[in-house]
Amino acid sequence: MERVIDDYITQGYQVKSQGERSARVKDKDWGTALGHIIVAALTLWWTLGVGNVAYAAYKRYTADEVTIKVDNSDSA
């Protein structure tokens, strides 16, 4: 399980919680550069950058979350 968690961490995820048999990791996503450019081009004049902050918060809140569980069931 530690190896799988380490793989996710190297992909940019962070550990939200970890127990003996499970762990939850979440992607650290603030949005893409292109997305921020588009939001800025469409809303910068009216929102003075608040649109980009809202976009970053939305992407962070809806980022991918993965639950890793250890299954030790014997099939023999």
Image: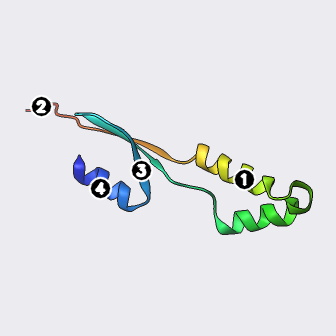
Q: Earlier in the sequence, mark 1 or mark 2?
A: 1
Q: Which dot marks residue 14?
A: 3
Q: Quadrant of the C terminus?
A: top left
Q: Is residue 12 positioned above or below 62 on the image?
A: below
Viewer-proximal residue, 59 or 53?
53
The residue that appears at 91% across and 62% down in the rendered structure is: 45
SS at badge 4: helix
Q: Earlier in the sequence, mark 3 or mark 4?
A: 4
Q: Which residue is mark 1?
A: 53
SS at badge 1: helix
Give how far apart the Cα atoms at labels 3 and 2 are: 31 Å
The residue that appears at 55% across and 48% down in the rendered structure is: 63
Q: Which residue is mark 2?
A: 74
Q: Are circles 3 and 4 on residues that touch, CB within 8 Å?
A: no
The residue that appears at 16% across and 33% down in the rendered structure is: 72
Please name the amino acid that badge 3 sits on.
Gln
Q: Is residue 75 positioned above or below 50 on the image?
A: above
Q: Which residue is mark 4?
A: 6
Q: Residue 55 location in percent, x, y?
A: 71, 52
Give how far apart the Cα atoms at labels 4 and 2 are: 26 Å
Give how far apart the Cα atoms at labels 3 and 4 are: 10 Å
Q: Residue 50 location in percent, x, y?
A: 79, 53
